Amino acid sequence: MSAGVIRSGGRRHPVLGVLGGMGPAATAEFLRRLIEATPAGRDQDHLHVLVDNDPSVPDRTAALLGQGPDPTPYLVTMARRLSAAGAELLVMPCNTASAFAPGLAAGIAVPLLRWDAAVAAGVTEHRPGIRRLGLLATSGTIASGFYRQVFARIEVEVVEPEAVPQERVMELIRARKGGVPGRRLLTDLHDAATDLRSAGAEEVLLACTELSDIAQGPGPLWLDAMDLVVERVLQVADAWATGGRPPFSAAPGILTGE
């Protein structure tokens, strides 16, 4: 048994490894939400979390647009460091990095929570019957098409911004990465979500962790991918504790290695 694994009511939860630094503020926001969402009455009820907050991972959008190096080797190195330190379940709080998850999963033995699949499951749980979903994400995420693919499998059409509004979304993301306080960017984020609703989206998904960091939680105009993944991490951890390692049957399609 790994050292430091938490016990609650005699149950064993996995050590969670977080591939962070994409970007650092978004990683901190993910951890904050994970802690707040955990039903804990004391320190010992929280998950044991290992974080590799490595901002040297090459830009994911640049790679997907053919303008930068492949980040997969960096992600594999990070995942292996976390595994060597005792991580038993991995999560990567970066929507755009999900495009590289297949290559990452092929290079590691530890199960990785599939961010896109977890988000799709969460959307259908929170908005049953939805047919048109607006997507606010990096240009790399949009170019990769992985959200279109995962939602097409459940017959949900993804509505994406046109070129000019998408550049404004990228300006928001770059501004937050550059240290502009999220509160100064929130009005523009509301405007971007409103534009997608005007284009026929029944719901809007914040699918970039910088946008999640700007939003600082759920809002009337959107669902937040980060919140949906946090929910799923806790569900998988509980299933793991109940059923033993690995709890693949408790999270169909969510973990690599199923």
Image (tube, rainbow, N blue to C red):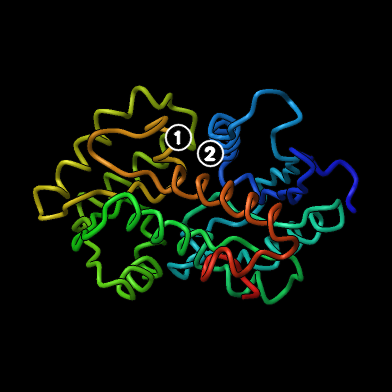
Residue at image coords 84%, 52%: 86
Q: Looking at the image, is 191 positioned above or below residue 161?
A: above
Helix, strand or loop under label 2: helix
Whole-percent x, y for residue 108 in the image: 74, 70
**Which of the pair 187/256 is nearer the observer?**
256
- The residue wearing badge 2 is 26
* Of callouts 2 and 1, the N-terminal one: 2
Whole-percent x, y for residue 255 in the image: 59, 66
**Which of the pair 17/140 is nearer the observer?**
17
Q: Looking at the image, is 9 positioned above or below residue 62?
A: above
Whole-percent x, y for residue 32 in the image: 57, 31
Find out whether the residues at labels 2 and 1 contact each other: C-beta distance under 8 Å: yes
| Residue 90 in which image quadrant | bottom right
Residue at image coords 43%, 27%: 180
Could you say which disc has been placed on residue 97 in the image?
none
- The residue wearing badge 1 is 213
Kindly identify the amino acid type of the residue bearing the numbered disc 1.
Asp
Whole-percent x, y for residue 216 in the image: 42, 30
Cα–Cα gap, marks 2 and 1: 6 Å
